[in-house]
Amino acid sequence: MGPSPAAARLQALNEQLPAHTRLLAVSKGHPASSIRALAQAGQRSFGESRLQEAMAKQQELADLDGLDWHFIGRLQANKVRPVLKQFSAIHSVDSLALAERVSRIAGEEGLRPAVFLQVKLRPDPNKGGLSADALEQEWPRLQQLPNLRIVGLMTMAPLGLEAPQRQVLFAECSALAQRLGLEELSMGMSGDWPEAAAAGSTWVRVGSALFGPKP
């Protein structure tokens, strides 16, 4: 009996990823049983964007050791505390004010989460994020925030860009991270992860190409 379809997709994807790029399995919208199947095949890092959905799945999977949960959705101010309690990394801190709130609440909870700052390098009404100029202007204040480990940048390409345009966008984000001395890059999803990986992404967020269509 061969591997399950999910395990086969996981193996095929891992074989394509460059050595510097890790896979974040985007499990939002997929049941705990699908996460369990991938965990049994060796995947450990999973991305969720809805707190209540994630908490239910985390509870169902509490018997599995070593799962690494990343929050990748828009982080609402009133959800910061429960998100911090459930996730080790946050990919979507998109303003100085939100970073300050995360830092304060993390201190109250005795936590020090890994944080990616979300940047928006092209006009896109559907996505938030700091512009490159705003990030560089606020970087000294961001660096001084206690209780945060700002590890890298996260960006998403707007819909409609061709592959060469996405490649340029990801390269810009990589260059910005280098200027700030940040080593991690959360870039690339199911449709564009090869361009992101080629530009130096250290985390690609893949859902449908891994789990298949949502039930």
Image (cartoon, rainbow, N blue to C red):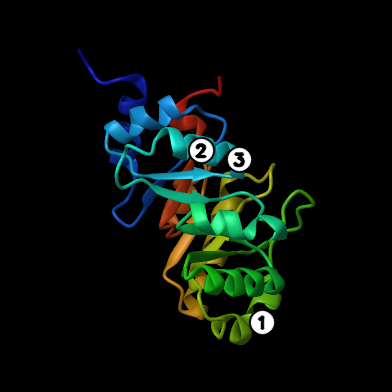
Q: Earlier in the sequence, mark 1 or mark 2?
A: 1
- Which residue appears farthest toward the top when viewing the image? 1
Task: From the top left corner, tell me how far across and down residue 198 is, in percent.
Answer: 42, 54
Residue with the mark numbered 3: 52
Q: Position of residue 86 (x, y in %)?
A: 50, 52
**Cα–Cα span, label 2 and label 3:** 24 Å
Taking the view exactly as shown, the residue that stands out farthest to the right is 125
Please, is residue 8 above or below residue 17 in the view?
above
The residue shown at (63%, 71%) is: 99
Determine if residue 76 is in view.
Answer: no
Give the mark nearest the N terminus, 3 or 1: 3
The residue under label 1 is: 138
Task: Tell me which residue sits at (76%, 57%) in the image.
Answer: 123
Q: Secondary structure at mark 1?
A: helix
In depth, the one of 81 and 198 nearer the eye is 81
Identify the residue at horizontal 42%, vertical 26% (top origin).
Answer: 34
At x 47%, y 31%, the residue is 209
Q: For the residue labelled by badge 2, is the local secondary structure a helix, a strand or a loop? A: loop
Mark 1 crowdedness (10 Å alpha carbons): few <14, some 14-19, many ≥20:
few
